[in-house]
Amino acid sequence: MADVMSILSANYKTVGSSVPGKTAYVAVDPKLYQGTWTGTYPDKKTFKLTVSNVTGFRAKVKYQSGSTVKYQDVLIKDQSFRIGDTKFRLTKAGVAQIRNVITDPATGSTYLDTATANQS
């Protein structure tokens, strides 16, 4: 049993040290992210993201668009985070780019919806 645990431990350390990424997770300024973000996709669908409890590089996010509502705890890295198929990227104070992967139920094909969100 000890051999199995040492193998798992060694593998865990190896995998953990090779996680790809541009930068390490670092604390962010909560004022830059916290609040309500709203916008409209090119197809005129509106969306709203509510970012709360920003602590360090963690936050709680609620995403709403049409009948879709998602709740998720997120990690903020490189000025961005993901909630489901949606990516939020802060472009400047009060403005973010939102990218949402949409799957057409009839054909199964996917496309990328991109919009700008403003913080209020």
Image (cartoon, rainbow, N blue to C red):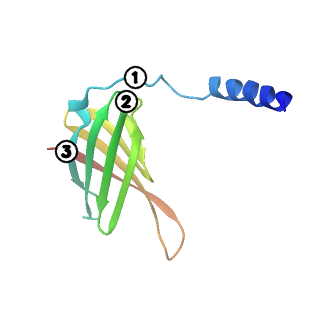
In the rendered structure, are the residues bearing label 1 and label 2 in contact, judged by CB atoms less than 8 Å apart? yes
Task: Please tell me how crowded label 3 is: few (under 14), some (14-19), or many (20+) other residues with Cα within 10 Å.
Answer: some
Question: Would residue 56 appear left or right of 36 to someone viewing this image?
Answer: right
Residue 41 picture location, percent across and down: 28, 58
Residue 82 picture location, percent across and down: 42, 44
* Picture layout, residue 48 above or below residue 91: below
Q: Residue at x 34, y 27 (%)?
A: 56
Q: Residue at x 68, y 24 (%)?
A: 13
Foreground: 20 or 28?
28
Image quadrant where residue 48 sits: bottom left
Query: Considering only order in the chain, which callout, 2 or 1, is on the residue closer to the N terminus?
Result: 1
Image quadrant where residue 60 sits: top left
User: According to the image, label 2 marks what residue?
Assistant: 57
Disc 2 secondary structure class: loop
Disc 1 secondary structure class: loop
Measure the alpha-carbon separation of dots 2 and 3.
20 Å
Measure the alpha-carbon separation of dots 3 and 1.
24 Å
Disc 3 secondary structure class: strand
Q: Residue at x 29, y 59 (%)?
A: 64
Closer to us: mark 2 or mark 3? 2
For the residue marked with disc 2, what is the amino acid? Phe
Q: Residue at x 20, y 31 (%)?
A: 31
Which circle marks residue 118 in the picture?
3
